[in-house]
Amino acid sequence: MTMRLFDTARRAVVAFEPDPHVLMYTCGITPYDATHVGHAATFIAFDVLQRRLLDLGYTVTLVRNVTDVDDPLFAKARALGVHYLDLAATEEARFERDMEALNALPVSSSPRASSAIPDIRGFIGMVLDRGFAYQSGGAVYFDVGAFDGFGAISGLDEAAMLELARKRGGNVDDPGKRNPLDFVLWQPSAEDEPSWDTLWGPGRPGWHIECSALALRELGTTIDLHGGGADLIFPHHECERAQSEAATGEPFARHWMHTALIAKDGEKMSKSLGNLVFVDDLRTTWDARAIRLAIIEHHYRREWEWEDDLMPRADARLRRWAEAAVDDALDDGGVLDDVRSALDDDLDTPTAVALIDDAAQRGKPIVAAAALVGVPLAAGDGFTRSSQRVLTADTGDA
């Protein structure tokens, strides 16, 4: 069966038919705080996709960057009175522990933006040489007017792009710009920010250029699939595509995949609202497999809300699966193929979970099917003590 995935740029579910060696890039964390479930949901979706591609026999190279040169990181480090790279290293290590606990497969590489300054300087030079950028006030800006098709990924008109750029750090009122939608490739650094020398003056890279340079360095000119959270569609991925294709003259990504945002208390999870749910906090109480189940019972591109009963429900599901896995052979008698079909249908994890639920209830083998969605089970499987304690407190079960 051909895998079908929603492509943001084409705004439709289409066949995903990469070459035998699949090249994927997903935008990673800015390491200034702990991993919340919104982050986790994005990376778990890409993990399930990677698992199914490997199951189909593909070789997968998945790159997930670390944005360790960026405004939020500098601001947090400034507030804490620590060096930005020390803060980044601490939070990156915590993120990696969370991903390992959630049973995410290791990525092929997780390059840091700070490692790519020579690549970024060369990349900006390419964009300037091809006439898609200009210098102004010690900065280098991408000229969106020189690039045909700006806005093709998001499908937004100019007014909507301006509104989102204003909300998401686009600095549309910058007097150095020719067009409010032009975006920074290189900018002067503040006094307490890192700075590197270039032909166009000292400073640091803009946000968007970092991923383009890393993707080109790690994966080459054209990649099979690029993605991240839906909040990155514009401006980040729109700008990334434009500058990448301007620099190389080749298509940047054949397929764009984005995950929906998660809400809590009726609002999108955000630091400013204080409504974040952190993975490492959940792990002090719940089996990490249950956290993964709480995420994958929702479809990756449909918005959903984190509710108080979600973890007890996921933990109870995990216990049912674990009990059904006792004396389970790895031959799951058709359940695995049904789950494969669900994943091939735009990564339909809710249906996959429901299929495993049904098979567990009917006494059918489920170990291989559960493993495909990243939930390891084994005969005699147990739970963390904290998981049993919470389940007992919430349900009265012994």
Image (spheres, helix red, strand yellow):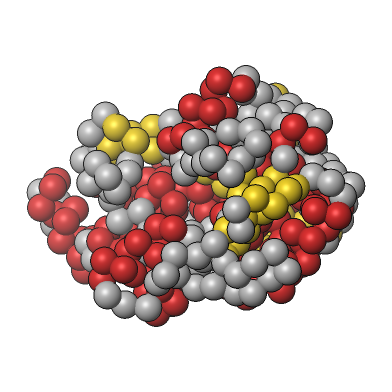
Quarter of the rendering containing residue 334: top right
Closer to the camera in the image, 121 or 348: 121
- Looking at the picture, tell me which residue is in the foreground, 208 or 291: 208
Q: Which residue is drawn at 64% across and 33% down?
A: 179
Numbered-mark total: 0
Decide which of 97, 353 is in the foreground and name it: 97
**Which image quadrant is residue 347 in?**
top right
Say whether residue 80 is visible: yes
Query: Residue at (68%, 29%) from the top-left corner?
Result: 151
Left-right relation of 90 to 239: left
User: Which x, y percent locates residue 265?
Assistant: 23, 34
Looking at the rendering, in which quadrant would you find the C terminus? bottom left
* Residue at (73, 48) in percent of width and height: 134
Q: Can the viewer see residue 18? A: no
Image coords of residue 369 (percent x, y): 57, 51
What residue is rendered at 54% in x and 28% in y?
162
Q: Nearer the viewer, residue 160 or 137?
A: 137
Image coords of residue 345 (percent x, y): 66, 33
Relative image position of residue 172 (x, y in whole percent):
52, 36
Q: Is residue 227 above or below residue 114?
A: above
Work out which quarter of the rendered image holds the N terminus and state it. top right
Q: Judge from the rendering whether residue 273 lies leftward or rightward of residue 15; answer left or right.
A: left
